[in-house]
Amino acid sequence: MGIHKRKKPYKRAKPLGRPDGVYLPNHEQLVKLICMRGAKDEEIEMVYGLGPGTIQKWREYYPGLDKAIEQGRTVADGQVLFSLFKTANGFHEYEEQAVGGKTPRVLKVKRYYRPEFLAQKHWLASRKKEDWPAMERREFSGPNGNPMKVESRNDVIEAILGLVTPKKDPEKEKPQKEPKA
C-alpha cells in the first residue's frame, strides 16, 4: 500500500471583488457615458457602490460591459488626442464679444490660438519615442564615479559650484617664452 498525500485546499492568488452589487445589462450605456468622461474602473465602482475589483471581474464575465467600457474610453481618448493635436498646431475658434458703448452689440469674432510648444513636445514624445524622448535624465556622481557625499547645505552649494565653475587650463598657465631679439 502506498501513502496517499492529502491535497491542500485551493487558495486564490488575489481576492476577487465583493459581489456587493448585481450586474444589470441595461446599465452598459450609463457605464459607457461614465467612461467617456475619463473614469477608471475604481471610479465606476465608487459610482455604483461596488467593492474593489468587481468591475474587473465583471469585465471578464460580461463581454457587453467590457465593450461598453472600451468604447467609452476610446471616445474620451479620441477627444483628448484631437484637443492635443489642435493645441500643438494652432487653431481658429469663434467667440462672442460685446462691442459698442451705450448700446453694445454682440459680434462673433474669429480668434487664433497659437501652437503651444509643450503640446508639440508631448505629441512628438508619444508618437516618435526614439527621436523625441519624453524626459532627459542626468545623473551626477562624486569622485571616481562614487555617490556624492553631502553633509550640509554648504556642501551641496560647493558641489554645485564645483560642477559649473570652469577649470583652469594648464596649457594657458605655462610661462610663455619671450621672443629673442
Image: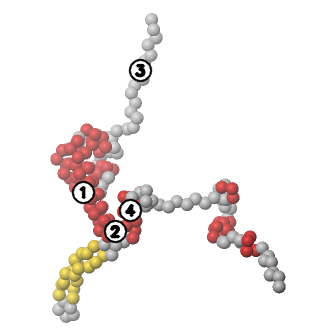
Helix or strand or loop: what does disc 4 sit on? helix
Q: Residue furthest front?
A: 181
Q: Is residue 66 visible?
A: yes
Residue 168 appears at what percent x and percent y? Answer: 71, 72
Give left or right: position of 155 versus 31: right
* Label 1 – label 3 distance at C-alpha: 49 Å
Tell me the amino acid under the disc marked 4.
Answer: Leu
> Residue at horizontal 36%, vertical 63%?
123
Residue 8 appears at what percent x and percent y? Answer: 42, 23
Residue 146 higher or lower than 2, as above or below: below
Q: What residue would you read off at disc 2?
A: 88
Mark carried by residue 75: 1
> Residue at horizontal 17%, vertical 92%?
103
* Label 4 – label 2 distance at C-alpha: 10 Å
* Label 2 – label 1 distance at C-alpha: 20 Å
Q: Residue furthest bottom?
A: 102
